[in-house]
Image: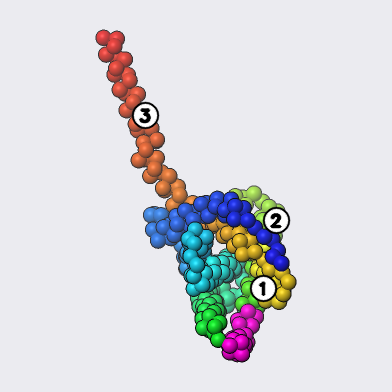
Amino acid sequence: MAWGEMSDEAFLWINGPLVMLSLPANVFFACSLMFPPRGRQKLKQPVKILLGFVVWCTIIFLISLIVRYSLVVENAYFNVTTRLLLRYSVFMSMTSCVWMSFYYHTQIVPARRALSIWVRKNIKSIIYIILFLDRSVFFFNIMVSIVKFIKENQHRNDSINNTDIASEEFYGKSNVCFIVIKVHTTLCLCLMMFSSFSTVHYLRTHMRRLAKSGGGDLAVSSRRLRGHMRVTVTGILQGLLYLLCEVWNQLKSFVFNYSLHFTIDELLIFTVSTAYMCGTTVNMAVSQAVFRQKAADVWTALRAVLCVDGTTGNDVKLHSSQSTTLDKT
């Protein structure tokens, strides 16, 4: 019995606008990272590499979704490849958002304890090591899934006993990978919630302290506070997106691995992932100054090309005044 069945028309009507909004935006984000605005403060590491992971994972997900459902390919290897790309691009995007939120937490909230001071001092190395381990876990799981699929496909036409042996051979490895992924994503969820809400608590206390000390200090710190508040609010929204998506992934994994009577429609699964990616895209557009600055530069260049800034208008007014003078003479 399939739960949450979705028709092809509903899938197209929901995912079509989300893809049309998210794909051009993320291509623009990728260009902004490769060609940052001139004369502006450049992104520091590890924010740049984390943003790069989020942007490129989103692009890979959206292109894989378009290819999977626009091309009618009756090939098992094609279906498995696109399914793995869709699944793990979402996972890697989600964990990259977690570590970005944690990085901003270490930069906004003052470190008072010895462990916090050490983490803040070595935050770049810590995130690079965690990213390496994080990606290694995902790629190992991908390889196990591919090998399991190949083995099952090779033994599909063999006897039942051989098929059982092949299934038992990889059942333990698949279970280990499943448990490792679930533990990893659950820890990431806890870290995301901790980073977001502890940052909110600090900023709330800090703003109250500034308000009590007088308006001068608040005016001096207003620009920095606005930046911190923007990052914090978008971080909270990203945390809520992560929470909803992770609860959905846990439910999906439980049903897929342990339920014998219920299944979840694949179209619904990828619709939830598309909504998460679109929400992450909007969050990045609001929170990251490099994207807003690049958009402002592009808009200024377009206005210059289209002569909307008044240059052509002045020429038109000059010609019209000249023609009026000629008519009077």
Mark with earlier residue (1, 2):
2
Relative placement, left or right, of 14 versus 302 is right
Give the total of numbered labels: 3
- Residue 113 visible in the snapshot: no
Q: Secondary structure at mark 2?
A: helix
Mark pair 1, 2: CA separation: 49 Å
Majority SS type along the magenta span: helix
Q: Position of residue 248 (x, y in %)?
A: 67, 66
Region in magenta: 159-180
Camera-nearest label, 1 or 3: 1
Q: Secondary structure at mark 3?
A: helix
For label 1, count other residues whose C-alpha is less than 10 Å away and answer few (under 14), some (14-19) or many (20+).
few
Look at mark 2 in the image and give the residue it sits on.
Answer: 208
Q: Position of residue 154 (x, y in %)?
A: 51, 83
The residue nearer to you, when weighing 134 against 319, is: 134
Residue 26 in the image: above or below residue 109: above
Residue 201 in the image: above or below residue 157: above
Residue drawn at the location 58% of the way across and 76% of the way down: 119
- Asked if disc 2 and disc 3 are in contact, CB closer than 8 Å, the reply is no
Mark pair 1, 3: CA separation: 64 Å
Q: Quadrant of the C terminus?
A: top left
- Residue 46 on the magenta segment: no
Camera-nearest label, 2 or 3: 3
Relative placement, left or right, of 290 versus 248 is left
Residue drawn at the location 52% of the way across and 69% of the way down: 79
Look at mark 1 in the image and give the residue it sits on.
Answer: 256
Look at mark 3 in the image and give the residue it sits on.
Answer: 313
Q: Amino acid at mark 3?
A: Gly
The residue nearer to you, when weighing 78 against 221, is: 78
